[in-house]
Structure formats: structure tokens, C-alpha cells
Amino acid sequence: MKRRQFLKISSALFASAAAPGLSWENSPVLAAPEERVVPSICELCFWRCGIQAQVKEGRVAQITGHPKHPLSNGKLCPRGVGGTGLLYDPDRLRQPLIREEVDGKQQFRPATWDEALDLIAERLGYLTAFYGTESVAMFNHGFGASFFKTLFKAYGIHTFSAPSYAQCRGPRQEAFKLTYGHGLGSPEALDVAHSKCLVLLGTHLGENMHNTAVQDFTEAVARGCHLIVVDPRFSTAAGKAREWLPIKPGTDLALLLSWIRTLIEEELYDRDFVEVNTVGLEEVRAAVAHATPEWAAAQTGIRAERILATARDLGRYRNEALVHPGRRVVWYGDDTQRERAIAILNALLGNYRHPGGLLRFSGFSVPSVKFPEEKNAFASFSSRFPLASAPPANELVEQTVSGDPYPIKAWFVYGTNLIHALGDQARTLQAIEALDLLVAIDVLPMEITGYADVVLPECTYLERYDDLDTRSYRTPYVALRQPVVKPMYDSLPGHEIARRLAGKLGMPDLFPDDMEAYLDGRLQQVGLSLQQLQVEGVVSQPEPEDLYRQPAEPLRFRTPSGKIELASAQLAQAGFDAVPRYTPPPAAPPGYFRLLHGRAPMHTFGRTANNRMLGELMPENELWVNAVTGKDVGLKSGEYVYLVNQDGVRSRTPIKVRLTERIRPEAVYMAHGFGHTDPRLKFAAGKGASDADLITHLSLDPIMGGTGMNNNFVTFTRSAES
Ligand code: SF4
């Protein structure tokens, strides 16, 4: 028998009565009249828009955008409006669960919080005494993880990995750091609204529904922005574009290098800016000399005249043009270098802190409370990827399997369904099998919770405080997430779970007993109060006067040279190409199609697939197949097929075929986040298919360990047999 069998949670475990929740009866918000509007922050995705929740007779009746929050401007995306679908999801985790074995059979049993946390504390104590604190890793996604990180740092645990790094935007982060000395942040500091020429490469804004990013995009389009969309698929954004370049998948870097070459050779770049603020132009010129439009046309499948014309468009708009760096950018394994090419292009255009270009945001300064950190803690995870600034999640998986260079024996998994997020599921399951302790903290019974030893039910973002959000989107702001209604069932806010666990780990005074006093204390330091934020939800500062640079303003970048590094000495020193070099992607085996995946506007990947409100808008994903090639292989629109990948791995569930002219013939496309198989997700289970089932090959980015997932190929079968 497997050491850790996947466990379903029986419906009997959902039958417990609602627990009393925290003693928040005196909260001015929760004690307010029966009908009220409570400002807070959305967490249906990580963008953290300001919301206003209308509460009637103790239930959240409606959620709308906060008019004064810079990320909302009074609007929400469809998911944000559907937040009550999460709050009132009947499948929510309702009480702590402990894995136990009875008569040789593993099962979950309901537990009290004390029992569950005592067990975790006891096993952590044993594991860290035996293997050291480095044997514990935390995987986290979302704002609510902050107090767990504080707790673990105080205990000497420093290995934190967010799948949003190696599985999403890490290559962008490192590429811009290498080039400009800083990343783009999140939300990314881009002046899309004022761009006069915008290039989107595989970035499907409009389907990728980050509220303010889409608002800015809409504004740019309304202003008549010259939009160039590079995508193998005719996306929603492509439908708004002046130019759609239906690129052969995996060849984007060839196009970018050719654009760089044209800008340099035809002297279309911003000479004044480049001369003063960059280094490495001649190295770049030499490295891209081969990248003629004809050469790029042969790679990309886009006609040379169109490559040349779009390069000239960029040069014509120059510093009012922006090549969007994208967000989920782990595609083919050359992702940091592709993002470097985007960074170089933007530098040549001279759009740094220019209207319509790259910006720099600095957040609202509210001093943090200093928590103690274990001085003798294992300093940090040592990555075999020299320029990784955070542990890539898959590297922790590998290390958990191998125990090399030291064993990892316990995982804390907060708000991320690693089974669907990481790719190479078999390897993830192998790592899980090697663990002595797996704790999952979540709102819903996502697949990862079925492998946990202890499941801790967190309440939703509508039932809890989190720490203050002090970021900036053009204007610095401080915003409050606060409970709109009391926690349902026996769920707890993350900060309360962390506080109780701290007590069990011998640190009873680590966190303040009273979260409201903690938040008020922070706010008082800058002349604000919790009471003010409870009423207003957000306080913003004026837009900084130096958002845009002045002509001839001296700039200094945090790179070794102090300039924008077009050719990267840091990369060269680490043994990589100083200027990006193109390598063609692997070809599909005969009869197979490259599997591409992306987002749907009404879902945040698997996190919302069980949300009945959003599920009404889109209950399942579809497989886009080119109409001509689809018919050639006998597919019909509307029929369901299973997918089989290049390694013979089959999708667990079938997917509905959509034959369309809107995709290149060598690729197929699906929205990520469907195909849940866990019956505990009663609405989502069995709807659509999961690309994660089929991503068995990861193309690792040698620079920072990003997991390129687009070098997987599928064919179709109607057979339900494996
Ligand atoms: Fe919520 Fe949508 Fe904003 Fe994400 S973009 S935080 S889901 S409203």
C-alpha cells in the first residue's frame, strides 16, 4: 500500500455544525446593521482589487468594484463579482482533518484545531530535530501566506517557494532585473493605457482578465492604439488588433531578434536615450546581424514584409510604443532570454518611464512590524540555477525525491494545488510519497488536500483579515482586507492558524492576540487608523510627480554598470549568452499537435472551477483545433475526445472539440484549470480536461529554473480505455 493514498473526504465529514468562529462580535464591521456595505479586497485572483460587499441579513448579496481603489476604479472582472460562489460553496472544507489508518485502510477523520495543530507541532519538532529546519519547505500562493512565513522564519525555516515564480512570471522578473536592475513587479508597472503602439506576444489580455490591466488595454484601444498581436491563436486581443501575426509556436525569439536588428540597422531606435542610458549596443548589433526579416520569416511562418513593417511601426512610435512582457511566460525553456529580448526592445525604444512605456511604481510606505527571525536558521535554498532569486518549485520536488543535497521531509502547502500547478504530476506524486509530513491549508478540497496528512480549512477572503496591502498602481495605496461576514463552519483565518501554531511551537508571543490591534498599530504609524480603513477600505496617495522622467533626466540603474544592460555581463559571467540567441523549438512527432494552454476570463485556473456562479458562465473548457486539420483527422465540433501525449499519457477526462479557423494548424489550445477528478469538488469534477495531466515534459530554463510547459504534444482518441 502507498504510504500516502489519495483520500476523498466523505460527505459525512461535511455534516458538522457551524463552529462559533472567532470572538469578533465586537468588530464595528460585523456588529453593524443588518444591511451594510463593507469594503475589502478581492482574492479570486492575486490582483487584489478593491471591492464593496453588500451584506443583507447576514449574507453577502452582491460584490461590486470599489470606486476609489486604484486596481478597481469601480469595476470588477467577472470572477470578482462571483466571489460569493466561493463563500457559499457547499463543498468547502469545514473542519481540520487528520489522516489515519484503520484496519489497514487510510482515511480522514475530523479533528479539533488543537488536535490538528498539536500533531503538526509534534511532527515538525521531530523532523527539524532530526533533519534540521532545512527539511521543511513551504509552497504558497496568495496574500494570506504572510503570517505563515513569519511563523516559519521565526522557527528557522526559510525555504518558501511560490509556483508563481518558476511556473509563471519568474523569467520576466529575472530578465528585467538583468537588463534594468529591477523587475516589473506585480501588478506590472506598465503604462498600457497611454501606449500608442502596443505589442502583445502570446499575452491574451481580455481572456487573461486582470481587472486594471484589461481596463488599461481597453483605454488604449479606445484611444486608437496601434495594436500588434503575435499569437498562434486569433485571441480576443487579436480581434482588436491592427496586425495579427499568427506565429508558429516557439519561434517568438526569432521575431524579436529580427525586430531588434531592424531597429538598429535602420536607426529607428531612440539614439539619445540609448547612448546615455545603455551599454552593449554593439554587442547586440553583432549578435543579431543574421536575424534578417527573411531569416525570421523562415522560422516564424510570418512573411518577411510583415516582420519588417511591424518593426518600422515600432520605430515610428518609438518611445510611445511598448512591447508587453506578458505574465505567464514559461513556454519553451528559453523564456528568460525571450524576456531579455523584450527588455532590450523596450530599451531601444527609449520608453523607460515615458508615457506609454515601462514605469516604476513604489508602494505606500507603512512600516512593517518586525518579527523575530531565527538567527541560526539555514540561510536559503541553494539552487542549481545560478540566477534564480527564489527556489523554483520543481527543484524542491526533485530534492524531495532525491534527498540531495539534503533531505526535505515536510511540505506546508498554502493555497496552491500543486497537482495541477507544477506539471509532471508523476514526479510531484513521487515527491509527496517521500514526505513524512504534508500539511495543506486551503478553502476547498483541491486535489493536493487528498494527499495531506493534515488538512487545515482556512476561511475565505470574505471572512478574514489579512495583512495590509501596501502597493502601488500609478498611485501608492494602502488597502484593508477585512471580514465581511463571520467565518463559516470551523474554518479560521490564516493569521489565526499561524498564531495558534506558533503557540504550539513554543512561540506564544510571536503574534499579537488581537489582529485588529496589530493592523491599527501599523496604520497609526502613518497617521491612519483601522477604523478609517474599515470604513473607507483604501487610502491612496496622489500620483507621484516623477512617474514619468523629465527630458535628459539622469538615470541610474541597479545593474553592475549602472546602465541598462543590452548585453548582459552577468549572464556572460554565469556562462550564458550575453545577448539572446534563438534555438528552434522541438518539432511535433508525426500525427501530434503542440499543446498550448491559457486563461479564460471567468476563471482563475482551477481555483474557481468549482464556483457555481462562474461555472454557469463557463462550466468546462474546450479544445481548439484548426478546422482544416481537425477535419483531416476526422474530428467534429462538439464531440468529446481524450488526449494522449507524446509519452503515451492520456487525459483523465474527455474534452469537447471546437473546430475553428482561429488557430494555426500545428497547435491545439485549451484553457487551464479544468478536468478536476476529485469527487469532493462536486461541481467541477469531470468537467473539461486538464492540460496538467499531459504536461509530462518540462523544458527547464537553464538560467532560473522556469518550467517551460509548451513542448508537449497531443493526439486524440475517442476510446475511454487507457
Ligand atoms: Fe478579483 Fe478579478 Fe480583481 Fe482578480 S482581477 S482580484 S478576480 S476582481
Image: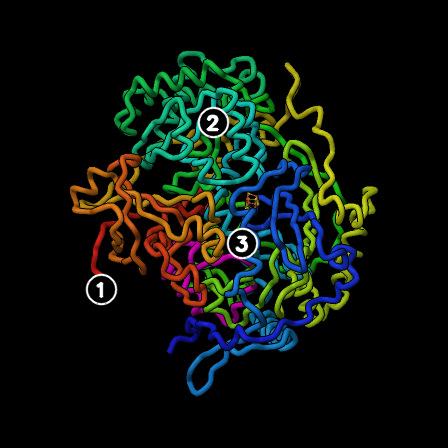
Number of residue marks: 3
- Left or right: residue 497 versus residue 691 is right
- Residue 241 figure quarter: top left
| Mark carried by residue 323 | 2
Q: Is mark 1 within 8 Å of ligand 1?
A: no
SS for callout 3: strand
**Residue range of the region highlighted in magenta in the rendering:** 415-441
Mark sitting earlier along the chain (2/1): 2
Assess disc 3: are there few (<14), some (14-19) or many (≥20) residues with their C-alpha within 10 Å of its C-alpha.
many
66 left or right of 372 in image = left
Residue beneath the point at 43% across and 44% down: 599
Coordinates of residue 541 in the picture (x, y in percent): 74, 34
Q: Residue at x 55, y 33 (%)?
A: 215
Observer-side mark, 2 or 1, equals 1
Mark 3 — residue? Answer: 161
Res 665 quadrant in image: top left
First in sequence, mark 1 or 3: give its number: 3
Judging by the rendered image, the residue that carries numbered circle 1 is: 721
Q: Residue at x 43, y 35 (%)?
A: 203
Specify the amino acid type for callout 3: Ser
For the residue labelled by badge 2, is the local secondary structure a helix, a strand or a loop?
A: strand
In front: mark 1 or mark 3?
Answer: 1
Q: Amino acid at mark 2?
A: Val
Residue sitting nearer the eye, 89 or 478: 89
Distance from disc 2 to disc 3, alpha carbons, whole Å, reads 29 Å
Magenta-colored stretch includes residue 563? no
Q: Residues within 10 Å of mark 1 (few under 14, many from 20)?
A: few
- First in residue order: circle 2 vs circle 3: 3
Which of the two residues, 69 or 542, is positioned nearer the viewer here? 69
Residue 555 percent location from the top left of the image: 64, 22
Residue 429 magenta-highlighted: yes
Residue 325, can we see it? yes
